[in-house]
Image (spheres, rainbow, N blue to C red):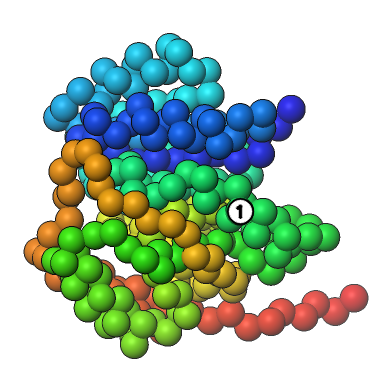
Amino acid sequence: MSLEISIVIPVYNEEANIQPLVAEVTQVFRGREYEIIVVDDCSADSSWAQLQQLRAENPRLRALRHSLRCGQSTAVWNGVKAARAAVVATLDGDGQNDPADLPALLQALLDANAGANAGASRRVAMVAGWRTQRKDSAVKLLSSRIANGIRRNMLRDGTPDTGCGIKVFYRDVFIGLPYFDHMHRFLPTLVQRTGSTVISVPVKHRPRLRGKSKYGIWNRLWVGIVDLLGVAWLIRRSHRPSVEELA
């Protein structure tokens, strides 16, 4: 039987979150055809050892490891490339996304394309989570609010929460996107650039209970603004006319 969905989870030093998160995903998709792909971005803690143990216990789990630290975008990219299902979901590895939201996002994607064939006839290529009640620190909320405001003004992609880690999308659309570091922050915009539609669905957001956040003003906000200029450049140079062929 073919897989219904591949769930990709990038992690870096998340030894306290991996087992609970994998257990939650397993419970949510019990009785369905799925796989979990956890990509360890060269963690310095026991994340990889835990994945090795969990892999021996859970045949649905696949574990990938980077030989050097490359960042979240590369972890997501390699996880999606390794995915065997036509539909892929992503979750952050810190446990703040609730896996219980995934079936609703998957169904929203399928319903939006009911009756459509694969490829260009799809109307919606991605369903993005929208954290309407975030459980983050004041610094993280302020940084995100500033970055999102600048992004909305420059890109006008209509996505209220592009930084939310929980998303469901078609694998072939993702593979066709331009790859660059930090691309995961701009996935809705990049998907729209292909001529596809992205819809946002409210999802739950949980406080970080274990581990340490990697978020900071300098490593996220200002770097994100620089990346934003590059994405805006891509959008300005994209032309997607309708094409008519003589019969």
Closest to the observer: 30 or 170? 30
**Image spot of residue 6 (x, y percent):** 55, 39
State the residue at coordinates (20%, 35%): 13
Please tell me whether mark 1 sits on a helix, a strand or a loop.
helix
Q: Is residue 20 visible?
A: yes
Side (left or right) of 126 relative to 17: right
Image check: 28 left or right of 11?
A: right
Is the N terminus in the top left, top right, bottom left or bottom right quadrant?
A: top right
Lateral position of residue 27 relative to residue 13, left or right: right
Looking at the rendering, which quadrant does residue 160 occupy? bottom left
Residue at 43 percent across and 12 percent down: it is 56
Identify residue type, mark 1: Ala
The residue at the far left in this view is: 218
Does residue 119 sit above or below 21 in this rendering? below
Q: Position of residue 156 (x, y in %)?
A: 42, 84
**Badge 1 density bin: few <14, some 14–19, many ≥20, Cα 10 Å:** some
Taking the image as shown, residue 202 lies to the left or right of residue 17, namely right
Residue positioned 39% across, 35% down in the render: 21
Image height of 82 relative to 231, above or below: above
Q: Quadrant of residue 182?
A: bottom left
Q: Which residue is mark 1?
A: 104
Q: Position of residue 210 (x, y in %)?
A: 22, 38
